[in-house]
Amino acid sequence: MIKIDNLDVWYGAGARETHVVQGASLHVERGQSFGLVGESGSGKSTILRAISGLVPRWGGAMSIDGIDARDGHRGPQRPKYLRKVQMVFQDPFASLHPKRLVGEAISEPMKINKMDDISERTDALFAAIGLTPSHRYRYPHELSGGQRQRIAIARALALEPDVLLLDEPTSALDVSIQAEILNLLERLRQERGLTYLIVSHDLAVISHMCSRLAVMSQGRIVETLDRDVLAHGKAREQYTRDLIAASR
Amino acid sequence: MSAALQHPSPRQARLRAARSFARRFRRNPLGMAGLFIGLALIFMAIFAPLLATHDPYAPDFAARLTAPGWNYWLGTDELGRDIYTRILYGSRITIFIVALVVFTSAPIGLLLGVVSGYFGGWVDAVLMRITDVFLAVPKLLLALAFVAVLGPGIVNAALAITLTAWPPYARLARAETLAVRNADFVAAIALAGASPWRIITRHIFPICYSSMLVRVTFDMAGIILIAAGLGFIGLGAQPPLPEWGAMIASGRRFIFEQWWVAAMPGAAIFIVSLGFNFLGDALRDLLDPHAKVRQ
């Protein structure tokens, strides 16, 4: 479903150029939930932004369900690409427009893509994320952090994508809310057959959510391993073992 | 969640937001004074024929330069015309000029600023250098040159002021755009497939509205002053139109003996400018996101 081969991403230019992601490769099967862990600045969020087309310069090859990312980021293939892959951002306070009703945030992607029955679909999405349709007519500041993140998830689902890119989906939330959001995401994945690529610095979140994961450090993928390998502490690389030890 | 937070319709949600804004606005006495002055100005303009005590144009030489009194509340000018009546009718000209300037310069500045900030690169460089050129010329001088080319008159005066009024709006809108163009909510709508035009008009414009509104309100005072200035030097409204600046100009000759001829329209300009400044101050306290951070 997600194929990334030898991805390089650079930020800045000239003397201030930084090589944020260096030769990263990963493959995610349909229906799988794949985790990316690493410290801050290890380049894990950048991979998600690169898939979404939010980084200016990248090299290598990426494709989602057979659509090449270079075609998907601009040109006639873009609408098709965007209906395959959507993203949930880390901070639900920054990812919702402060002056627009949250119902509009969810219905607008459908309007842009000329989908039908938008009002019914919007109501259904509110039900799917555990809110009522009356929440449609609220401003983001009238909702709690957890409710906002649910809205952000519903917005990402509005175009009925196959793949969700989740950038630290719970790190901006209270601990008590985090589990609710993770359970919601897991339920949505099973109901809709979604493929997840989840970025987190929290090994506990990744091991709860993902069957397979990659460990990143300083722009490189250090190791890719299965969840049970992680659970038995049988990581190959010293860096991964240190990370596991630090999270205990 | 309380029951009061249930919004059955988008209209009610917006009404609710407006009501909460009005509640906070009412706590600001100077802002209320400014609002009252602004509304009074509009009221005067609409009902000028009903409120007037005389004809604003017909001369009455028997009553030339009468001091303020029972018959002529604010006195008469050198042609015996009632100054109170002329100030009433002059409010129409003032509102016309202010509205014309605001409704042309604010959208131009908003569009150029947002486009400049959103696209960046050479678009930004070109648009901002043009803005710099306009900002570098003294306001009244540029307006003067423009009126000199097009000829005097209210509409030309307003257009001349527009020419000098849009660059600060462009700067402001650009700054607001730079602050949000990399925000996640802009990235999210771009990921939904929105075109740049849609992102600019539906998502970035609303971010700029509140600071633009504050700026526009402050500028109304300045627009009134420049319009009066152009009228004063004879390049704005032409006689016999009762434009306040032109009225001051005609009263200049009698300023020591018949002070009211210049002082009354001067007071009108003063009060209205002050009102808009009060209003702008109050709006800034409520709307300016940067001011909120400081509190």
Image (cartoon, grey):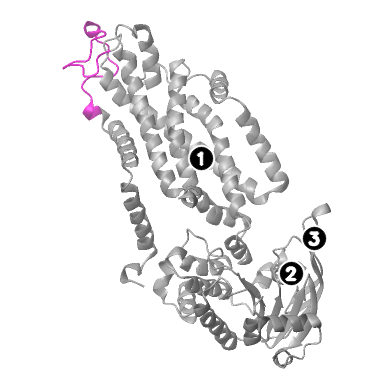
Q: Earlier in the sequence, mark 3 or mark 2?
A: 3
Tell me the element at label 3. Answer: strand
Chain letter of the residue beneath label 3 in the structure image: A
- The picture quadrant where one finds residue B16 is bottom left
Q: In whole angstroms, how far apart are the C-alphas of marks 1 and 2?
A: 42 Å
Q: On the rendered image, what quadrant is the N terminus of chain A found in?
A: bottom right
Q: Is residue A210 above or below residue A108?
A: below
Residue span colored magenta: B49-76
Residue B250 lies, in percent from the top left, at 37, 12
- The picture quadrant where one finds residue B183 is bottom right
Cβ–Cβ under 8 Å for marks 3 and 1? no
Tell me the element at label 2. Answer: loop
Chain letter of the residue beneath label 2 in the structure image: A
Report the residue marked by disc 3: A18
Q: Is residue B121 above or below residue B144?
A: below
- Amino acid carrying label 1: it is Ala
Residue A185 lies, in percent from the top left, at 57, 82
* Residue at the left extreme, as displayed: B70
Chain letter of the residue beneath label 1 in the structure image: B
Mark sitting on residue B106: 1
Residue at the (36%, 34%) spot, across then down:
B275
- Amino acid carrying label 2: it is Gly
Report the residue marked by disc 2: A43
Q: Are marks 3 and 1 on the same chain?
A: no
The reply to whether the magenta stretch includes residue B52 is yes
What is the magenta segment's predominant secondary structure?
Answer: loop
Return the residue nearer the eye: B97 or A27.
A27
